[in-house]
């Protein structure tokens, strides 16, 4: 089943043509990665699919809902992890998760928070204020916040940015197991090893266009490359 269908998506910010007509679809439970150089349009695409930005042209369907006509339905089934998000600094980590969980079904708050605490995995520090956290700890908390709701679609903008090797690996495993349980994942990353390890399929974006897409292993074959980094270097214009 197709979970997300993006057709001829265009986004202009004034004169800047950030996205110039991209199309892709994501199957249910798939992990789909957007990769591309700085300024390629990855965050813009993720923010549009998250309903935070309006599109200039094209259409997007998420789990059967037309995004422009039914944004509120899309918001109910989707979680978005922004690239650099601030959490509410005066709350404790747990207080922050409770605050967010209360926007959902009041009956599920306890379970949701327990899940968020487990994913964030901050030990006793979950009871400390967020403004005492390191960058990586904040990121873990926000990953917990994004995945504790069991979203049907998780949109994760550079989920492991700022994390050390162990934390990054753990977050990757959490994302993989979340997808195994049925969540569809759309993520962006600059880490080529990460996309190779995690993503079922990837799309390479450059200057607002998809220049290549497919399974990492197929792309490596096509470009006779040892890894996705080599594919990237061959495909993306200097
Ligand atoms: P990075 O890897 O650096 O995070 P990205 O692929 O996520 O980059 P975007 O942030 O989507 O890229 O930016 C795409 C283009 O749109 C860039 O040229 C950027 O300067 C431009 N852009 C992004 N946000 C705005 C904005 N609010 N107003 C004007 N231009 C913008």
Image (cartoon, grey):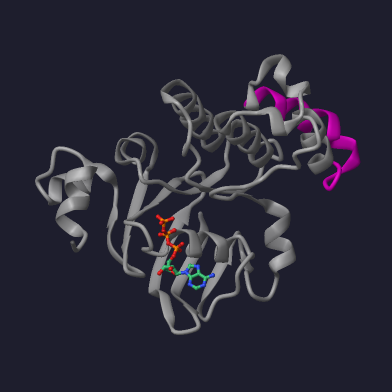
Q: Is residue 172 left or right of residue 102?
A: left
Q: Which of 238 and 157 is in front in this view?
A: 238
Q: Quadrant of ligand 1?
A: bottom left
Q: Which residue lies furthest to the front in this view?
A: 132
Above-or-below relation of 125 to 36 = above
Q: Which residue lies furthest to the top in this view?
A: 124
How many numbered marks does the figure carry? 0
Residue at 63% from the left image edge and 21% from the top image edge = 121
Residue at 51% from the left image edge and 44% from the top image edge = 29
Q: Residue furthest left?
A: 224
Quarter of the image for the C terminus: give it.
bottom left
Residue at 43% from the left image edge and 59% from the top image edge = 42
Q: Picture coordinates of residue 155 (x, y %)?
A: 55, 50
Q: Quadrant of residue 203?
A: bottom left
Q: Picture coordinates of residue 171 (x, y %)?
A: 51, 30
Above-or-below relation of 45 to 115 = below
Q: Is residue 60 left or right of residue 142?
A: left
Range of residues picked out in magenta: 102-119
Residue at 21% from the left image edge and 59% from the top image edge = 236
Q: In this view, does 118 lie to the left or right of 34?
A: right
Q: Is residue 225 left or right of residue 159?
A: left
In magenta stretch: residue 117: yes
Predominant secondary structure, magenta span: helix
């Amino acid at each position: 089943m197709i979970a997300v269908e993006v057709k001829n998506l265009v986004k202009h910010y004034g004169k800047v043509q950030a996205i110039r007509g991209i199309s892709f679809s994501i199957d249910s439970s798939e992990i789909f990665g957007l990769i591309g150089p700085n300024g390629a349009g990855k965050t813009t695409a993720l923010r549009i699919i998250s309903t935070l930005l309006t599109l200039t042209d094209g259409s997007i369907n998420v789990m059967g809902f037309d995004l422009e006509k039914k944004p509120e339905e899309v918001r109910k089934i989707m979680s978005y992890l922004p690239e650099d998000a601030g959490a509410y600094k005066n709350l404790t980590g747990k207080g922050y998760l409770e605050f967010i969980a209360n926007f959902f079904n009041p009956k599920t708050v306890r379970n949701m928070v327990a899940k968020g605490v487990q994913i964030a995995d901050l030990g006793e520090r979950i009871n400390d204020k967020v403004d005492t956290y390191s960058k990586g700890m904040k990121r873990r908390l926000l990953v917990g916040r994004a995945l504790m709701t069991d979203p049907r679609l998780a949109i994760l903008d550079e989920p492991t940015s700022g994390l050390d090797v162990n934390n990054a690996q753990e977050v990757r495993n959490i994302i993989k197991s979340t997808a195994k349980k049925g969540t569809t994942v759309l993520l962006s990353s600059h880490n080529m090893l990460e996309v190779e390890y995690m993503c079922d399929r990837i799309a390479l974006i450059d200057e607002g266009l998809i220049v290549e897409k497919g399974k990492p292993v197929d792309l490596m074959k096509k470009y006779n490359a040892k890894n996705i980094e080599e594919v990237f270097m061959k495909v993306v214009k200097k």
